[in-house]
């Protein structure tokens, strides 16, 4: 069975039941057919309305119709209690000489805490973050006028250092958040643990934004207490392919891999190698560097040493430098240019050697194995000195006379010999 509720100007006109056999479910009706069907049902609708008004409709049908009545639809929902809004304490300015380090501050170990660099940063930019303090009470639980810093001990020490350096007044107004609820240790611990360290990629992009606004590498390095080489490294990382930066942001590659990709500035080459390492098991930084430099010549190659980096760059060659690893001079990118320079210099050296009197000179970067098979090395013979020749002639003459005299002497026999 299916119930049909007929309305007239927003009021219920009839509620009646029809069987599935009387209405073909899923069929498409024309406007004329639908109008004709409704006209046939009007007598039944009138009886159904009277039955509803007289209380004849009961159970589920009456509840369903009651929910659809205009009175039920205009009924206002019950009022709920409003949730109280959170109120935040506004910062207050407190003289610096009224601030002391609270004994409940959880940061007790001073190792590795740099106060000088933070003081220099505050001198350059001012205090960027307020201090969290609590009133110090006496034995009678009365405020003494002093405040203990429960979060911001490094900032307090940096401000006191600026006072010692005569760069800040000892009663300078300091913005503070005054708290009195909860525990000192809880607030101090939350201030040091709930903060999130800046993602390295955000730092790379921030350095690039400063550089785009006209800040030099040396200026950025001095502002953030790092070396100029570190600034160059981070700017190089910020210039990587957007595909690699997205992969690094999604933890698909590590920082070492990203640094290896930044060996070259060619985004197409970076993305090509990135797609290639997805198909091999070795995805380390060394493998990435080998793939990026497979068509280059290392600066320690004998051809590069023979030409020299200065002559190569003077001819328009490009040397790729690895800012993140010891590259021993970098990689020479233009290999055809290097080979041309080597050939020209070898030819010039061959002419110089040939001018010494040699019949022919052959010069090449490499010779095939056993290329000198038909050649014979000549061993030099040192000529004898005149004194040696004179002594040799005298000795030869003496020996010759001795032999001649012995040959011409009469033979002698012993007496009594037979």
Image (cartoon, rainbow, N blue to C red):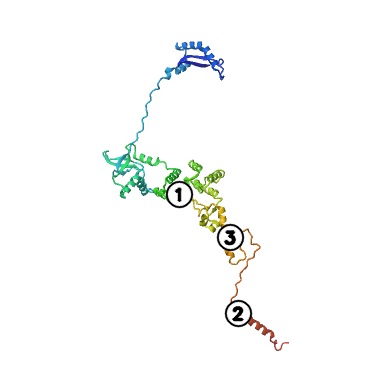
Quadrant placement of the C terminus: bottom right
Q: Spot the residue most to the right.
A: 418
Outermost residue toward the bottom in this view: 415
Count of marks, rendered view: 3
Q: Residue at x 57, y 58 (%)?
A: 344
Q: In the image, residue 352 lies at what x, y percent?
A: 57, 64
Can residue 138 be seen from the camera position used here?
A: no
Q: CA distance from mark 2 to mark 3?
A: 48 Å
Q: Which residue is mark 3?
A: 347
Check residue 390 in the rendering and tell me which mark sits there, or answer none: 2
Lower position in the chain sequence, tag 2 or tag 3: 3
**Residue 72 visible here:** yes
Horizontal arrangement in the rendering, residue 129 relative to residue 245 (left or right): left
Q: CA distance from mark 1 to mark 2?
A: 78 Å
Which of labels 1 and 2 is toward the front? 1
Q: Secondary structure at mark 1?
A: helix
Out of 103 and 274, give the one closest to the viewer.
274
Q: Which residue corresponds to mark 1?
A: 232
Which of 401 and 358 lies nearest the eye of the viewer?
A: 358
Upstream in sequence: badge 1 or badge 2 = 1
Whole-angstrom CA distance, mark 3 to mark 1, is 41 Å
- Image spot of residue 369 (x, y percent): 63, 59
The quadrant in which residue 96 appears is top left
Checking the image for residue 118, the label placed there is none
Q: Nearer the viewer, residue 114 or 30?
A: 30
């Amino acid at each position: 069975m299916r119930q049909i509720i007929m309305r007239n100007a927003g009021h219920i006109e009839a509620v009646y039941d029809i069987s599935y056999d009387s209405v073909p479910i899923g069929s498409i009706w024309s406007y004329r057919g639908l109008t004709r069907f409704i006209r046939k049902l009007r007598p039944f609708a009138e009886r159904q309305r009277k039955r509803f008004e007289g209380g004849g409709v009961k159970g589920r049908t009456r509840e369903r119709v009651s929910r659809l009545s205009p009175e039920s639809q205009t009924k206002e929902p019950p009022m709920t209690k409003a949730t109280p809004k959170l109120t935040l304490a506004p910062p207050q300015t407190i003289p610096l000489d009224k601030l002391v380090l609270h004994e409940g501050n959880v940061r007790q170990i001073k190792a590795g805490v740099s106060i000088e660099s933070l003081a220099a940063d505050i001198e350059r930019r001012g205090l960027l973050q307020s201090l969290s303090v609590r009133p110090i009470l006496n034995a009678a639980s009365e405020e003494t006028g002093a405040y203990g810093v429960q979060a911001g001990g490094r900032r307090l020490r940096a401000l006191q250092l600026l006072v010692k350096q005569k760069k800040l007044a000892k009663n300078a107004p300091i913005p503070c958040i005054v708290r009195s609820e909860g525990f000192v240790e809880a607030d101090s611990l939350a201030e040091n643990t709930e903060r999130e360290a800046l993602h390295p990629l955000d730092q790379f992009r921030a350095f690039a934004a400063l550089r785009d606004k006209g800040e030099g590498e040396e200026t950025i390095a001095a502002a953030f207490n790092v070396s100029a080489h570190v600034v160059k490294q981070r700017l190089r990382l910020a210039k990587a392919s957007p595909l690699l930066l997205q992969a690094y942001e999604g933890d698909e590659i590590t920082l070492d891999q990203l640094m290896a990709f930044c060996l070259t500035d060619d985004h197409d080459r970076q993305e090509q190698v990135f797609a290639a390492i997805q198909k091999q098991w070795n995805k380390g930084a060394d493998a990435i560097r080998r793939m990026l430099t497979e068509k280059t010549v290392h600066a320690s190659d004998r051809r590069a040493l023979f030409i020299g980096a200065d002559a190569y760059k003077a001819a328009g060659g490009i040397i790729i430098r690895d800012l993140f690893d010891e590259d021993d001079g970098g990689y020479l990118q233009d290999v055809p240019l290097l080979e041309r320079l080597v050939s020209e210099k070898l030819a010039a050296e061959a002419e110089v050697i040939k001018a010494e009197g040699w019949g022919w000179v052959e010069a090449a970067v490499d010779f095939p194995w056993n290329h000198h098979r038909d050649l014979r090395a000549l061993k030099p013979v040192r000529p004898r000195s005149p004194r040696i020749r004179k002594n040799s002639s005298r000795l030869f003459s003496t020996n010759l006379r001795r032999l001649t005299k012995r040959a011409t002497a009469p033979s002698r026999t012993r007496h009594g010999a037979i």
